[in-house]
Amino acid sequence: MITIKQFKIIAMVGLLVPFGCSDEILDQTNPNEIAVQGFWRNAEDAKLAVNGMYHPITGTFFWGRIVHVGALLRTDAINPIPSGGNTSLSTFQGSPGVARWAQEPWEEAYKSIFRANSILENVNEENVPNTSDRNEILGQAHFFRAFVYFYMVNIYGNVPLVDKTPDPKNDDELFPTQASQQAVWDLIIEDLQLAESMLPDSWSSDNLGRPTSWSATALKGKSHLYRSGLLNVDEYAVAEAALLEVVNNGPFNLLPSEQYQDNFTQTNENNVESVFELQYHPIGNGNFVWGQDIPRAGTQGNFVIEYAPPSQTPDNGHVINPWVKNVFESNNDEVRRNATLAYDYPGSVINVDVPFTEGLASDIETVNSLLGQPQNTGLEPIFTRKYSGLELPAGATGFLGDDYGVNWRIIRYSDVLLMLAEAINEQNRPADAEPFLNQVRTRAQIDVITGLDQVNMRQAIIDERVMELTGEGHRFFDLVRWNLAETYLGANSAHEGPHPKSIAGGFFQSSKHELVFIPQSELQSNPNLIQNQGY
């Protein structure tokens, strides 16, 4: 179990990983004894440290897979088929000390945070005298610390705010208490403001995918929008200003409608619509490294396990709830439907060119067999396309996603437009929100929306986010910040058709399931931590 007290050892080992095969390491008397003072020699050392900072988050135990299992799949769009402990958190049935997958993201997050702190504490004018190099290094550390805390405060809510390397002689630093959510959000925004001023507007081709100043501005706007709902504060004007800066002055645009699916495949990655995406590459040849903190282990897209249909995953997969399909069809949206959902519509194919009803025949049978249970009445064989590997030949992703290398788009320009429309509408200016909403609708080749009041515009934005962003990890957090999680995921869901978690059972409970529980191992290791409400 990883505790905050162990961060120093783990973090520095991770930072030095790139030297693991050198002759110098082999010649050492004790290769486990790491002299921290000898590491921060120059810009190249610092850049290696930056790469080590990203690794725990892209790896299997955070975004590479586990954060989906334990957090993102709680959405009302996804109806998991039971797969032992792997589906307990996504169906609101997990409990501390029993359920899997709350612990690993916590551990990986604090590894990354520690590495960011180490960079911020050790990179200076002396070891990186070039101002541009130094700003790029420090800017990435500020951005990524903010990025990690953004997900920590949305997943766990009440987390320690570790913004410096703990003093091993100071118990208050080794065993910190949880900070207020306000304080965590404040650090996120402070870090993003610093990142804005330090990061470049763009990177050279060999560094594509690193966060830019625009990434920081977009995440800052998103943070103000999120905490307006979560903390019941009015920061919509501040969110608008940041997001409008990206729209008016950033280098972004929407891909043409015929290229919409490029946002979720290895084709055209880091494109003009991408504001920030996590970089993935297949490790190839069926190799597999499960969650190890070693080079390349964080590049495999194991998350495909959670999005592939039942017949193409070692888990049991899930079904998309029919209400999602209905939103697409009621808007005559075929462009995004065809890139988001796999079901039996005209021309529907999977695995490049296999007709849906043929290629997923066993999956259709699986869903149909569930219809004999009354709670599943209305369920349909609808599956996810985004990040599912269905654009590739069958089996091309590897058994556990080791050959899957699709980058995960964290913030797309279309999301920025919809967040901007929301921030404006929440200031009761629905007419001013229309152009940004309609840019997204026009790309999807559906009718524009005009003349709505604030309430109806709010619903239009909610529905648009379903069509544009389903399967990308936003929906559950949206429901919580809109105070709609109980409405759609509670025992009496407002959705027509089966309950969103009908197959496995379980339902959302207010004042509990907004957050995942604090891992039991952390409570045992740090007596100053308090469990989240309801657990």
Image: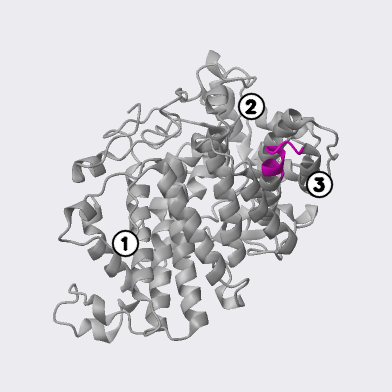
Rendered location of residue 518, percent (x, y) = 32, 39
Horizontal side, residue 250 vs residue 168: left or right: right
Instruction: Give amino acid for label 2.
Output: Glu
Label 3: which secondary element: helix
Q: Earlier in the sequence, mark 3 or mark 1?
A: 1
What amino acid type should be assigned to the residue bearing mark 1?
A: Lys
Depth order, front residue of 283/237: 237
Q: Name the residue under label 1.
A: 164
Indicate which disc, 2 or 3, sits on the residue closer to the N terminus: 2
In the visual, does 197 lie left or right of 300?
right
Element at label 1: loop
Could you tell me which residue is drawn at 46 percent across and 51 percent down?
186
Q: Which mark is residue 398?
A: none
Q: Can you tell which mark lies on residue 435?
A: 3
Q: Where is residue 82 in the image (x, y as percent from the top left)?
A: 44, 30
* Alpha carbon separation for disc pair 3 and 1: 43 Å
> Residue 249 appears at what percent x and percent y?
72, 64
Q: Can residue 66 be seen in this view?
A: no
The foreground one among 360 and 471 is: 471
Question: Magenta residues?
Answer: 421-429
Q: Mark 2 points at which residue?
A: 380
Q: In this view, does 508 lie to the left or right of 225?
A: left
- C-alpha separation, residue under disc 2 versus residue under disc 3: 35 Å
Residue 297 in the magenta stretch? The answer is no
| 10 Å crowding of disc 2: few (<14), some (14-19), many (20+) | many
Instruction: Note whether residue 202 is visible.
Output: yes
Q: Nearer the viewer, mark 2 or mark 3?
A: 3
User: In the image, is residue 387 above or below residue 40?
Assistant: above
